[in-house]
Image (tube, coloured by chain):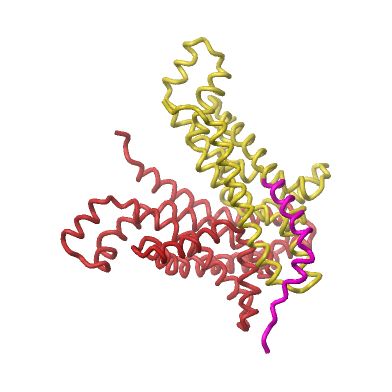
Amino acid sequence: MDHGELLFLLKGLQWTVVLSAVGFLFGMAAGLGIALLRTSKFQAVQRITAGYIAVFQGTPLLMQLFVVYYGLALIGLKLDAWLAVAIGFTLHASAYLGEIWRGSIEAVPKGQLEASHALSLGYVSRMKDIVLPQAFRISLPATIGFLVQLIKGTSLASIVGFTELTRAGAIISNQIFRPLLVFGIVALLYFVICWPLSLYGARLESRFVQPAH
Amino acid sequence: MSYQLDFSPVWDGFPELLWGCVGTIGLALAGMLLATVIGIGGVIMRQSRFASLRYPVIAFVEVIRNTPFLVQIFFIFFALPLVGIRIDPTPTAVLALGINGGAYAIEIIRGGVQSISKGQYEAGLALGLHRSSVFRLIILKPALRAIFPSLTSQFVLLTLTTSIASAISAYELTSVAKRIESDSFRSFEVYFVVTALYLVISGLIMKLLNMFSSRYFDYPVR
């Protein structure tokens, strides 16, 4: 494997990082909305968001990408492959993060909520100043865990035809007929990104574990 | 120009799709079985006194959990022939799913085993049970019971992961869907229906695991 081929892999890695970052950031914004709707007091809104989450958690990411990819074309949106894929990852992330954060919002001790009611804080202030900061802390290990899932998930964009790290690897592997070497390097590159995140998440989690009573 | 949805190729291919569902469920169940075996074996090694047994398991878990399944299945797909093993794509996919799911199962089951207090183990030995029966009856079963909900959601994820096995054209639902799509060019229609089928499959698998749990772990907590 020569210089140019390695550079091609790194170029793929760059797209993997961009795709993960875009999916995660927009997914966080949408996910926050989902989590707030899911924990709202309106039954109908709760049901709809619960259904949204259940659909994304009950179907393969690959199918979600296919449906979004072809669905967008169907409603007349002519988008670049990468944009269509990014929208797919954003929707996927919004459902998973929405569910993680719903759990965290509900894990904030009830007394906090009662105290904020007693202080007659409004919904916005109650959420922004009391509940969400604590929920965010609780959710951090799971959120980082999902980020790792998402980074690994971007490899599926290769099946839709987008050239990120895994597809770059497949292309080079077909050229030089050394699949083990190429996919070994590809795996190593993913590992170098994901492992530190996983370790960080595990460390946060062990720090949050309450001592046994 | 407006596009007309046409689901007829999907309904024509529906029997094939149902066989694809059977393939997916088979793949998922075989993968779960292998993952459970790897998970329990891995935990036994991980708890060993010998560092030479512990460290390979730790490395295995970290490597598998921090690389994409798609890369793993490609690697295994190309590696097996090189070491002289020639098997079809479908068994290859079972192997890959088992290895991937096994790494997660090791971590989950280990959490359960650690939650069993040491006194239980000592009490078992004091009753004159053999070490292996102490592990099986007093440690493993309550541990599995404690972590079964986590294992269930991991296995539902494994079921969804089977769709990636279409990349090496194992026999399952996504491969069947791809074939119908390339014959009919009705991409959206095919994948929309197949997504709904996956929703049914993951619901079924969850129900199945819950049924198993209420049968197998059917004894009072204390």
The image shows residue A16, relative to residue B80, as above or below, that is below
Residue at position x 67%, y 38% in the image: B34
Magenta stretch bounds:
B1-28
Front-lying residue, A133 or A76 = A76
Residue at position x 62%, y 58% in the image: A60
- Chain given the colour red: A
- Chain given the colour yellow: B
The quadrant of the rendering that contains the C terminus of chain B is top left
Residue B24 magenta-drawn?
Answer: yes
The quadrant of the rendering that contains the N terminus of chain B is bottom right
Say whether residue B136 is left or right of residue B178. Answer: left
Say whether residue B184 is left or right of residue A108. Answer: right
Image spot of residue B113 (x, y percent):
49, 31
The image shows residue B64, relative to residue A183, as above or below, that is above
Front-lying residue, B188 or B118 = B188
Give the residue at the far bottom of this rendering: B1
Image spot of residue A161 (x, y percent):
69, 70
Q: Quarter of the image holding residue B182?
A: bottom right
Image spot of residue B215 (x, y percent):
56, 33
Say whether residue B46 is left or right of residue A186. Answer: left
Residue at position x 71%, y 47% in the image: B27
Front-lying residue, B116 or A9 = B116
**Is residue A33 visible to the viewer in this orientation of the structure?**
yes
Image spot of residue A209 (x, y percent):
36, 42
**Is residue B63 visible to the viewer in this orientation of the structure?**
no
Q: How many marks?
A: 0
Residue A30 magenta-drawn?
Answer: no
Most frequent secondary structure within the magenta stretch: helix
Residue at position x 71%, y 68% in the image: B190
Give the residue at the far left of this rendering: A119
